[in-house]
Amino acid sequence: MDDRKATLAIHDPPYNLVAFEERPLDSFMEWCAQWVRNTDRVLSSDSSLYVWLGADQNDGFQPLADFMLMMRQFPFRARSFITMRNQRGYGTQKNWMAVRQELLYYIKGNPAFNVDAEYTDIPKILRGYYKEVNGELTENLQRGKSDTIRAGNVWVDVQQVFYRMEENVSGCYAQKPLKSTNRIIKASSATGDIVIDLFAHSGTTLLGAEINARRCMTMDIDPIYCEITIRRLERFRRTGRTGWQNGHAFEDEYVCGGNDGIDLADSISTKPDMAQPSLF
Ligand SMILES: C[S@@+](CC[C@H](N)C(=O)[O-])C[C@H]1O[C@@H](n2cnc3c(N)ncnc32)[C@H](O)[C@@H]1O
């Protein structure tokens, strides 16, 4: 960071579920405390921290519940517990279908929050909530600042990334939608601010920062994901494309089809839903 401070951190660590790399809960939490401490060190005195984290419903809702408690030892203040609804879910006929992703929002100091970023494209359709203003009976649509609804802390308007979407990055099993990342960046940072993400994977935060004219510092423990992240940004700068859809980041090295090379596109063009035993 070279002594520079970030205004915003967006972290999406592995969730300690079987699909990722499950380890004893204590050691997972210790590891989480380490990267939260590192994050605290590089965030400015007025800053925001967003953490995507799952709850294993077959194992006491770990690690989400434990993470929330652990966060109380840090100077961060809880602000919101956001749920993003997935289009596809998983589960059995004997339980509620699991369709959510959890996002925790914390702050340090008094960071700005740009409420404009919260407005969706979904029109307000419910009328009512009558109230008298200046002697006149008004309903909510007249009083509201916008014709569309605010996302609030239940995001139902974000398409889950799948292989037919332009932003799809083949081989990235845990890619977050750019729309959710853009929303966070716009709400909790300003032009030129530094955004950090310790778990780059497909590089969604880096790309979101580029699109919104922020600076981004990001990393991944796996050099393949680092390479994908760099290539995604470079390709975006060259072509304006946000992902590879049916192609992939290593097209120059691996010729697809024919006998010239490994047919990588065939093997990675659909996302393995690793955390999802049965899909609907
Ligand atoms: C859930 S994915 C992040 C997805 C990302 N938000 C996106 O939209 O593509 C988690 C990433 O964390 C990386 N990771 C796991 N342990 C790590 C560590 N100790 N330090 C840095 N990265 C790590 C994994 O390699 C994986 O790419």
Image (spheres, rainbow, N blue to C red):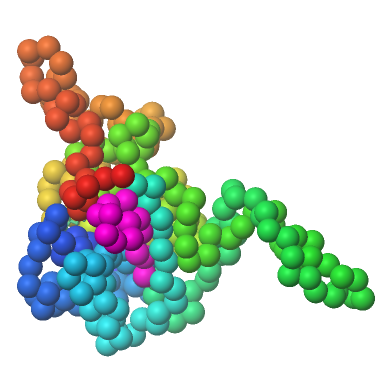
Assign ligand 1 to one image quadrant: bottom left
- 70 is higher (above) or lower (below) than 103: below
In the rendered image, the vertical position of residue 177 relative to residue 252, given as above or below? below
x and y, in percent, of residue 199 in the image: 23, 57
Residue 58 appears in the figure? yes
Q: Is residue 49 magenta?
A: no
Q: Residue at x 42, y 45 (%)?
A: 159
Picture coordinates of residue 58, whole percent (x, y) = 19, 67
Quadrant in the picture for the C terminus:
top left
**31 with respect to 99 (left or right):** left
Which residues are drawn in magenta? 89-104
Q: Note whether residue 214 is visible.
A: no
Identify the residue at the far right of this view: 135
Which residue is at a point 53% across and 65% down the rendered structure image? 152
- Left or right of 225, for residue 106: right
Residue 224 point in image, percent of width and height: 14, 43
